[in-house]
Amino acid sequence: MTSEQIIARHIVDAKYSDLAPKDIEAVKKQLLALYGATIAGWNSEGCQAAADLAKEIGGKEEATLLIWNGKVPASEAAFVNSVMGRAMDICDHIAPGVHIGSACIPAALATAELVGGCTGEDLILAVAIGTDLSLRLNLSEADYDGFDPTGVNAVFAAAAAAAKLMKLNEAQTLHALAIAFNRSGGSFQSNVDCSLSVRLNEGWVAKNGVDCARLASRGLTGPKNFLEGIYGYYHNFGRDHVENEKVINNLGKVWHMDTLSFKKYPSCGQTQGSVELILKLLQESGATWEDVDTIKVIINPFTSKLVGKEFEIGENPKVDAQFNVGYCVASAAVRHPVLLKHFEPDYINDETVLSFLRNHVDIIVDPEAHKRGHYSSDMVLILKDGREYKASIDIPPGSVGNELAEEDFTTRFYDCVEFSGLTFFAERADTIFNTLKNFEKLESIDEFIDLFKGDNLTV
């Protein structure tokens, strides 16, 4: 059997009982992170426009637009719900920048509503299948080389989850993934230029996952050697050095869910370490931002390309702030703790923070820092009285080896609810939280979807 056939058979044959408790818990953390982020990001830039456009385009009423209400074609619901889920940039992720859950889960939820009769266990299994496949197919920073890792990789997760819930056979499942391979793409230039395409790319991945599974169900085909073929995934994106055996080894027996990362701070993964360092050094020194002479933020070349440019407020202030390490460090220094609201326009335009950033924060690129890891960063804090403090970090909070505590997930969820400003979420917060924590007990996905419907959007 080819590796493509092995993967397709695994997707078809996988059962909920194959998942270990830790794998189920990992999916529930994905769900908790995503739907907290969705609640917080419902009205972020572009989200209402995306929802309104989906309604205007119209079509068969198959799946629900969360929060914005109404039903649209399943792929459009996956798109809009995914855009909202990525807007705050606090969903699950893995280095060097694949955001799996915020594409795979909306695709799975829309598909579950499309086919009907799905339980919480069904959705957990589909998300686990998709996530595990995406983790196995993840590539290096050098491999992606500026392609959006989410756009290249996570489309397989979304398509696999949709195929599982649609109960496609082996041949159809293989072709769903093969068609998805043809949708791999997207560029990190969206992030560098701080455009809304960052979240749109996420939405397209979710939408493509649903569409690819539906196309395959109707007999449309893709390249059957989409992984190992001469111009397949391993060649086009893996630069001909992907070890296929590692991709398919113990498939269905060992799940890689415990390699997911979850963010502590609401900004790009490449800013997490530097934010952690400034908070640590200020606490260690007993200083406040007013005592600071200079903060030297020392980052690796990849971090510099993605989030290291001079801070400018452009068309999308929130994205400008999320993807700028200088702003993140300055804001954390002046305002700590770091809150969701600090990435809103009124806070981003605060001259106190902007002046501190211009006069006291220096971004320095260390060409050798990447040898310590994808997220490696260092910091030197120099106070006005001459004292100097140094610290380094290779594993930011929320990543494997420096995991978040359970209470961090709880705190973040309720912070998201408060930030949303929606009264009906404040009233339902405990119910939604407990439903997410016990998702496997849902007899129908519709019960969960109903919790995201409101008579109006009064804030």
Image (cartoon, grey):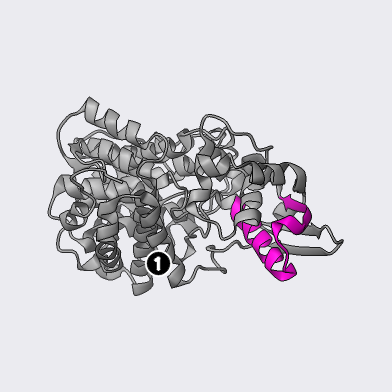
> Closer to the camera, 14 or 126?
126
Residue for badge 1 = 410
In x, y percent, where is residue 41? Answer: 39, 46
Residue sticking out furthest to the top: 57
The residue located at (58%, 49%) in the rendering is 140
Say left or right for 178 vs 266. left
Specify the quadrant of the image occupied by residue 155: top left
In x, y percent, where is residue 417? Answer: 36, 56
> Closer to the camera, 152 or 254?
152
Give the vertical position of 170 relative to 399 (above or below).
above
Residue sticking out furthest to the left: 117
Q: Is residue 291 magenta?
A: yes
The residue located at (19%, 64%) in the rendering is 442
Few, some or many C-alpha atoms within 10 Å of disc 1 (few <14, some 14-19, many ≥20)? some
Give the vertical position of 133 relative to 144 (above or below).
below
Q: Is residue 331 magenta?
A: no
Q: Which residues are magenta?
A: 271-299
Residue sticking out furthest to the right: 386
In x, y percent, where is residue 231? Answer: 48, 35
The residue located at (64%, 41%) in the rendering is 351
> Closer to the camera, 324 or 82?
324
The residue located at (61%, 49%) in the rendering is 328
- Which secondary structure type mostly characterizes the magenta part of the structure? helix
Say left or right for 95 vs 183. right
**Figure label count:** 1
Secondary structure at badge 1 equals: helix
Identify the amino acid type marked 1. Thr
| Residue 35 seen in the current view | yes
> Closer to the camera, 198 or 256?
198
In x, y percent, where is residue 433? Answer: 30, 64
